[in-house]
Image (tube, helix red, strand yellow):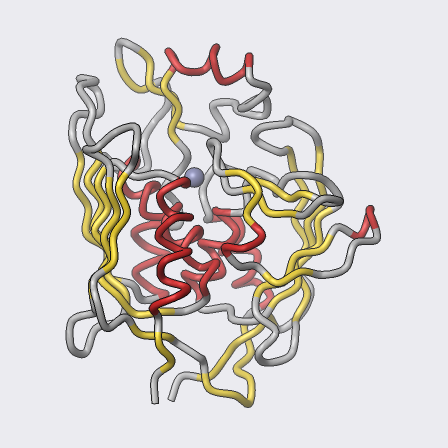
Amino acid sequence: MQRQQTIAGPVQIAGRALHSGVHVNLRLLPLPPDSGIMFVRPDLESEPVKASPEIVRDTRRCMALGSETWRIQTVEHLMAALHGLGVDNVLIEVDGEEIPVVDGSALEFVKAIQRVGLVEQDCARRTRKLHQPVWVQSDTDPRSYLVALPALPGEGLRITYTFTSDHPATGNQVYQYIHTPENFVREIAPARTIAFEREIELLQKQGLGLGGTLDTVVLVGDDGYKNELRYADEIVRHKILDIMGDLYLVGPFEAQIIAVRSGHRLDLELANKLQTVLCHMD
Ligand SMILES: [Zn+2]
């Protein structure tokens, strides 16, 4: 039996936000079994709210959670670290509208959590299973879809992503990830956010990507990469990182995910479907 886990003590991370560029403080605190991942804005004295697809407010470039009165955006890399390491119960406090971007990956969150450590709790993990295929497809780009199939016997979560691009530096990239905490830390957590130079001006006009620098994103210019890569296929690994984070809105589950050219919006649509079809194990 896998037990639920929380962090062994508080975790603090401060840094700039990717999209708004402002400085924010983040604190993670342990929670009792069956609490789930909770978000709170202490600066607004808001009540803690449990992460779920129902509280997503926006999927434009990042996953934003909230209600009428509060918002926390760019939660996906932190959520990926929690999913990847198997943290079931934690309170996420942030004193601004966005989680700090740190290095654009999940690595700094993973390291900070590993420094404090995890504790097993006196309760079984409520991993859910998929018994039927479900899928979603983009309205605007029919080549973009996301499929969830029942997990293979004896396997937990597997994610295969296909990234396609006519950009000569990136080309097409395919990656298959089989989830274990060790594989996550080694293969996925260090993969950073990618930005194409030709998209940046447009992004910044929309007030996005203002905290992006070469320390926080991998930049692809017309003549190639502007920084050194951590993996030759860093883009596709980061896409899997985003899926790990976005789909953790439904909590732990077992399935095979096949993703082609998908992004946060389709992740949310799939999370909504999964929420209705995932079943608790006996
Ligand atoms: Zn991302």
Does the image show residue 28?
A: yes
Residue at the spot 45% in from the left edge and 69% down from the top edge = 86
143 and 112: which is toward the camera:
143
Q: Position of residue 228 (x, y in %)?
A: 34, 27
Residue at the spot 35% in from the left edge and 76% down from the top edge = 279
- Ligand 1 quadrant in view: top left
Viewed as shown, does residue 29 lie left or right of 239?
A: right
214 and 146: which is toward the camera:
146
Does the image show residue 11?
A: no
Relative to 31, residue 73 above or below: above
51 and 109: which is toward the camera:
51
Residue at the spot 67% in from the left edge and 60% down from the top edge = 49
Residue at the spot 28% in from the left edge and 70% down from the top edge = 130
Q: Position of residue 50 (x, y in %)?
A: 61, 63
256 and 222: which is toward the camera:
256
Relative to 264, residue 32 above or below: below
Viewed as shown, does residue 276 lie left or right of 205?
A: left
Q: Disc count in the image?
A: 0
Q: In the picture, which quadrant includes the N terminus? A: bottom left
Relative to 201, residue 67 above or below: below
Viewed as shown, does residue 232 lie left or right of 71?
A: left
Q: Position of residue 94 (x, y in %)?
A: 71, 48
Q: In the picture, which quadrant includes the C terminus? A: bottom left
Viewed as shown, does residue 7 lie left or right of 235?
A: right
Q: Quadrant of residue 250?
A: bottom left
Q: Position of residue 193 (x, y in %)?
A: 41, 34
